[in-house]
């Protein structure tokens, strides 16, 4: 396991301060606020720690309410909404400075057999044939920005199948993006941990497809400003976040200063593991 992955797992290992109250901390991000994927992942950890181990998360729905302060702890308050025979529902509110910054609803289910079908995995290049972040980012970004972005994502091996937005700024493209990702090191055999890590990564690139449609380079080059508004995920089949996963993303629309991204996450052998939808603020600076 790399030091960066060990540090991320430590970040996600919340302190329990009461029966349904947990405390998390943050680390510096590329922007002066807490990374949304971190808050979503920590909230899911908090919810999961109040649920029997044989019930796995099958969906989450979240709203980002306020920008998080990376210099202050975050308190996660879990509400045990329902414990049914097959499903368990939890609501989590993340609080800083006496105000809610994030709200999560998550549902967990015991395993059961059922009807199965799925959308086919789209064509994608072999992840091992693609450049790493350390190889690709310095080609397209100023050295200081590339260094910060590489450091922020050091726990994850994330490889773009096509040029990222900042590499083709000024040229509108089809609003579609693919990345392969896996953690930079092996994880324990805890299914919730793999779901939590996928939740963390899912907020890194989903709105890229919105930027591509308009030839914008994005947050790294400063030709747009934005933030996540809401985030939803459905976990269909087991997967490991320490093995290659294809994040196939597209944007069906943007309007009114908002952009919508939707995506599917596939295992390398073609199983549809996760569906993701996110809306975010996407504004052109004045």
Image: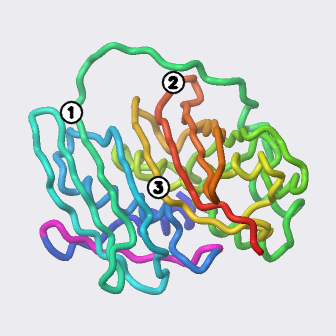
Q: Which residue is mark 3?
A: 230
Question: Which residue range is magenta in the image?
Answer: 19-30
Secondary element at image label 1: strand
Mark with earlier residue (3, 2): 3
Q: Are marks 3 and 2 in contact (CB under 8 Å)?
A: no
- The CA span between labels 2 and 1 is 20 Å
The answer to which image quadrant residue 148 occupies is bottom right
Judging depth in this view, the residue of 2 and 250 nearest the camera is 250
In this view, the mark in front (3 or 1): 3
Judging depth in this view, the residue of 115 and 256 nearest the camera is 256
Secondary element at image label 3: strand
Mark with earlier residue (2, 1): 1
**Callout 2 crowding tier (Cα within 10 Å): few <14, some 14–19, many ≥20:** some
Q: Position of residue 36 (x, y in %)?
A: 50, 64
Q: Which residue is mark 1?
A: 110
Residue 200: image tag: none
- The CA span between labels 3 and 1 is 26 Å
In this view, the mark in front (3 or 2): 3
**Callout 3 crowding tier (Cα within 10 Å): few <14, some 14–19, many ≥20:** many
Secondary element at image label 2: loop
Magenta span dominant secondary structure: loop
- Please identify the quadrant where the C terminus is shown: bottom right
Q: What's the residue at 85%, 46% (across, down)?
A: 172
The answer to which image quadrant residue 223 occupies is bottom right
Q: Is residue 58 magenta?
A: no
Residue 108 relative to residue 156: left or right: left
Residue 67 relative to residue 234: left or right: right
Q: Taking 49 as reference, is 251 above or below it?
A: above
Q: Which residue is mark 2?
A: 271
Q: Is residue 22 magenta?
A: yes
**Callout 1 crowding tier (Cα within 10 Å): few <14, some 14–19, many ≥20:** some
Q: Position of residue 147 (x, y in %)?
A: 76, 71
């Amino acid at each position: 396991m790399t030091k960066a992955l060990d540090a991320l797992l430590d970040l996600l290992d919340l302190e329990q301060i009461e029966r349904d109250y947990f405390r998390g901390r943050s680390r510096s991000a590329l922007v002066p606020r807490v990374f949304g994927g971190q808050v979503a992942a920590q909230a899911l950890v908090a919810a999961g720690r109040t649920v029997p181990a044989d019930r796995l998360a099958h969906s989450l729905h979240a709203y980002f309410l306020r920008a998080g302060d990376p210099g202050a702890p975050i308190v996660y308050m879990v509400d045990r909404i329902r414990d049914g025979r097959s499903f368990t529902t939890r609501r989590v509110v993340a609080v800083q400075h006496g105000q809610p910054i994030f709200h999560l609803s998550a549902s967990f289910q015991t395993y059961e057999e059922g009807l199965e079908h799925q959308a086919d995995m789209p064509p994608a290049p072999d992840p091992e044939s693609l450049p790493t972040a350390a190889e690709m980012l310095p080609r397209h970004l100023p050295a200081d920005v590339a260094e910060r972005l590489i450091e922020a994502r050091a726990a994850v091996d994330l490889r773009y199948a096509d040029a990222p937005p900042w590499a083709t700024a000024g040229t509108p493209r089809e609003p579609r993006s693919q990345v392969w990702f896996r953690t930079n090191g092996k994880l324990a055999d805890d299914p919730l941990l793999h779901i939590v890590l996928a939740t963390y990564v899912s907020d890194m690139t989903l709105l890229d497809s919105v930027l591509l449609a308009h030839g914008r380079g994005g947050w790294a080059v400063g030709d747009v400003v934005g933030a996540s508004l809401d985030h939803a995920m459905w976990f269909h089949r087991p997967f490991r976040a320490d093995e290659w996963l294809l994040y196939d993303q597209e944007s069906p629309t943007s309007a009114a200063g908002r952009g919508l991204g939707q995506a599917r996450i596939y295992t390398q052998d073609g199983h549809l593991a996760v569906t993701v939808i996110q809306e975010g603020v996407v504004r052109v600076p004045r």
